[in-house]
């Protein structure tokens, strides 16, 4: 995933990107690029259809209409079992208590 900020020179023409979810190519138009640049956004990683699908799922989860899928983990810090709302990609995953303790230690204003 790129967090590159785009300049006018980068936006001279439409770009073809590949969606991270469906692996289909989609066109990121020069007009869309200009909009993203004005808003300080990075290059999209999903096509419009997959963005809409992801947004609908997120909205449904927030409204309580759909229960978010949880994944079982063993905390890499304390060894206790727990659950996280994302599929772990590494063995270094913290339970809620360890995550909150680590966050509080890093951000004394929290």
Image (spheres, rainbow, N blue to C red):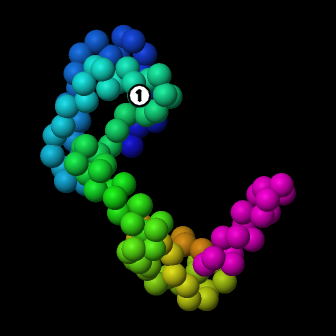
| Residue at x 29% of width, y 45% of height | 46
The location of residue 93, given as percent across then percent down, is 55, 72
Q: Which residues are the magenta region?
A: 95-110
In this image, 86 relative to 105: left or right?
left
| Residue at x 37% of width, y 34% of height | 43
| Residue at x 18% of width, y 50% of height | 23
Vertical relation: 46 (above or below) 88: above
In this image, 42 relative to 77: left or right?
left
Could you say whether the residue bearing mark 1 is in a helix, strand or loop? helix
- The quarter of the picture where residue 69 lies is bottom left
Let me know if residue 25 appears in the view: yes
The location of residue 58, given as percent across then percent down, is 41, 61
Of the 4 image quadrants, the one containing the N terminus is top left
Task: Give 74 or 13, whichever is nearer the viewer.
Answer: 13
Q: Would you name the residue on which mark 1 appears?
A: 36
In this image, 72 relative to 78: left or right?
left
Task: Give 78 or 17, whichever is nearer the viewer.
Answer: 17
The location of residue 79, given as percent across then percent down, is 61, 86
Is residue 101 within the magenta segment?
yes
The location of residue 34, given as percent across then percent down, is 38, 20
In this image, 92 relative to 22: left or right?
right
């Amino acid at each position: 995933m790129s967090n590159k900020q785009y300049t006018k020179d980068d936006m001279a023409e439409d770009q073809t990107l590949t969606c991270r979810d469906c692996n289909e190519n989609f066109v990121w138009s020069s007009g869309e690029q200009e909009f993203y640049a004005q808003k300080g956004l990075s290059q999209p990683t999903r096509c419009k259809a997959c963005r809409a699908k992801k947004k609908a799922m997120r909205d449904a989860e927030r409204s309580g209409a759909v229960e978010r899928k949880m994944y079982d983990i063993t905390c890499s810090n304390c060894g206790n079992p727990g659950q996280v709302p994302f599929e772990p990609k590494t063995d270094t995953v913290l339970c809620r208590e360890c995550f909150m303790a680590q966050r509080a230690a890093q951000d004394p204003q929290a």
